[in-house]
Image: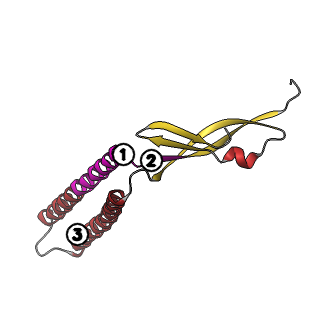
Amino acid sequence: MDNLRQLLLKRPINVKAVVTPRWKEEAQQQLQVQINQIDSELQQLEMNGQRMVAEIKRQSLHPLGPDALQQVENIQVQVNERKSQLLDQKNQNLQQLQQVQTLELEQEVSQGQIESIFTVVEGDNLITKMQVEVLLRDGVIEEIRGDI
């Protein structure tokens, strides 16, 4: 056995969850919190943009000169770009929320990946050793699938 050559390798492990009433509720709550945060950030963005424009107008001559007009336009472009990004995020979250609501109980859904370190020796099938999955039910490991 001392002659056995082995390697320690790192592999991704797919994590799946069984859809349960508790899982659905937690997923919906998490998405709703994210949506509320985006709404708050949108309000703050709008107020900050208006405040900066008002400050430029207050400090500038009337009518506004070309530099001040350019500053106002730049602020509005930046605010609109950020607003567009936030609205895209919000729409994605709303779509995910809708998808979560339509999931059937006991269905398996992907939760992402984690990494694992494992040992291989000469003669091992690397492909099967790389195909490992963990199945969770309400956060508890229900099953480890594959060649660990």
Spatial CA distance of label 2 from label 1 is: 8 Å
Q: Where does the image place residue 118, in percent across and percent down from the top left?
A: 68, 36
Tell me which corner region of the image, top left, top right, bottom left or bottom right, holds residue 69. Answer: bottom left
Residue topped by disc 2: 18
Element at label 1: helix
Residue topped by disc 3: 72
> Label 2: how many residues lie within 10 Å, few (<14), some (14-19) or many (20+)?
many
Element at label 3: helix
Q: Where does the image place residue 89, in percent across and percent down from the top left?
A: 34, 61
Quarter holding the C terminus?
top right
> Could you say which is closer to the camera, residue 60 or residue 126?
126
Spatial CA distance of label 2 from label 3 is: 51 Å
Quarter holding the N terminus?
top right
Tell me which corner region of the image, top left, top right, bottom left or bottom right, holds residue 53. Answer: bottom left
Element at label 2: strand
> Label 1: how many residues lie within 10 Å, few (<14), some (14-19) or many (20+)?
some
Among the two numbered marks 3 and 1 on one chain, the one whose residue lies closer to the N terminus: 1
Q: Where does the image place residue 79, in percent across and percent down from the top left?
A: 27, 65
> Could you say which is closer to the camera, residue 49 or residue 102?
102
Q: In the figure, 104 relative to 10: above or below? A: below
Q: Where does the image place residue 57, in percent across and percent down from the top left?
A: 14, 66
Magenta: main secondary structure:
helix
